[in-house]
Amino acid sequence: MTPKFIFVTGGVVSSLGKGLAAASIGSLLEARGFRVTLLKMDPYINVDAGTMSPYQHGEVYVTDDGGETDLDLGHYERFTSAQTTRDNNITAGKVYGTVIEKERRGDYLGRTVQVIPHITDQIKASIRKIASGVDVVIVEIGGTVGDIEGLPFLEAVRQFKKDVGKDNVIYVHLTLVPFIQAAGELKTKATQHSVKELRAIGIQPDVLLCRTDKEHLLTPAIKSKIALFCDVEEEAVVAARDVDTIYEVPLVFHEQGLDESVCRLLGLPQRPADLSRWEEIVRRVKAPRGRVRIGIVGKYIEVKDSYKSLYEALAHGGIAHEVAVDVAWVDAERLEREGLAGHVEGLDGILVPGGFGDRGIEGKIQAIRHARERKVPYFGICLGMQCAVIEYARHVCGLEGANSTEFDPKPAHNVIDLLPEQRNITDKGGTMRLGLYPVVLAEGTAASRAYGQGAIQERHRHRYEVNNDYLKALEAGGLRISGIWAEKQLVEIVELPGHPWFVAGQFHPEFRSKPWAPHPLFAAFIRAAMDHQAAA
């Protein structure tokens, strides 16, 4: 079957949830038996998200092939079966870079290189590149309609309909219908103007997803008004209301017939949708049998999207055991200034996530020591593993002054050091140890019990690693090396045998967790937190 294409745009304001909307549409089509893939197009000039601060753009999501991508690819993989790669996220920087490389090689034979057709052709080529082997390609255009940097992308998707035929393309526009307190009513004018802006570019939306809050829902009269002024069918005006859990979004859309409308507009067979998986997930989230409280000790806690996949993976661990996971955000810098008192009491588990730089490190080490000594379940991820090794080296192995060369260029004991292959690298973007690597697990360890197998693969993003020169000292002190990358004998997982649950990994397991398939380590961590709570 010729692939169909859905282009998702946004208007009025950013952060309306285009990524979630695109992912939810993908999940609905999969529930009807269609194969889908998704693409995020970001208009910023950065080549990828790898060099961007979490404060700027949230977390950097890493794919199996080592792509450093937008966090929306996490939504795509959590909501669908799509296996994304670096090709599932393009940026203006990547597009312009490719075109400039072609120009330098002489590929354009001396012609003037222009936005139209050369930039737009490259954008369209990126869409076609991921379209093989699937029934539907869902493309999300970042930013909002009217942003100057997004115009080449919108022009490209406008042209795409002419290229592949009008029966193979639809446009879905996400917009805001705000409730104005003073007037006491929902206002549609913002949506009308957003659609007007889109139509001025030459794109007529086929479906409107209208964001509203829980209390003020779209009435039939409001839907009819929007349909009339925006020239869309009434059944294609869909309320994208606030929900208790993001995993409810596919069900809300299905209730309003969104997947039926999409299939009809694209000429897809009207197969029945099996949403039992989503119904069960939502049931478990909304009616938990208990609750656990997990402390995330980080330094980007002001921007929750900095730890988006981590937060969702914890929720997945809760879904596995039908418990709610309440996250307590613990500022590592405050721990440095104020100590632990008042910050870590009452936690059923402590997690130190990944990150870079020395800010808040000593606070994280304090929290890890607390978890180790007080027998609180501990989960360390990437930097969280490195900090666990530093803490153990200092306070158990007697290696005073142990540190990472990332934080101290000349520590007394460089138990964490730069990977040898990273020593001569100067460029920052795309040069870390990135992507999927195999890990061999030691038998009889907490990690092997969690995974239920002896060999796994996990996604990585780091430059620093446990210094093998200190392995004997660490192991003599009681630290168990329970996972390694056999090819270069790199430490991948450490744990404490006498502790209820103390596991730390150099990789990022959060990137491979789904609500219907929670990552084994997160499921085991939440189980340990439940046991800790029961024993308290």
Image (cartoon, rainbow, N blue to C red):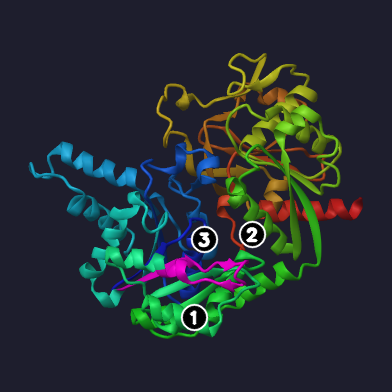
When the figure is inspected, residue 271 is found, relative to residue 532, above or below; the finding is below
Q: Helix, strand, or loop for circle 1? A: helix
Please provide percent x and percent y for residue 303: 61, 45
Residue tagged by mark 1? 223
**Which of the marked residues, 3 or 1, is nearer the chain's N terminus?**
3
Amino acid identity at mark 1: Lys
Q: CA distance from mark 2 to mark 3?
A: 26 Å
Give the extent of the magenta segment. Answer: 169-192
Please provide percent x and percent y for residue 83: 45, 58
Q: Which mark is residue 16?
A: 3
Q: Pick out the residue farthest to the right.
A: 536
Image-based side of 282 in relation to 27, left or right: right
Q: Is residue 524 magenta?
A: no
When the figure is inspected, residue 232 is found, relative to residue 54, above or below; the finding is below
Q: Helix, strand, or loop for circle 3? A: loop
Q: CA distance from mark 1 to mark 2?
A: 38 Å
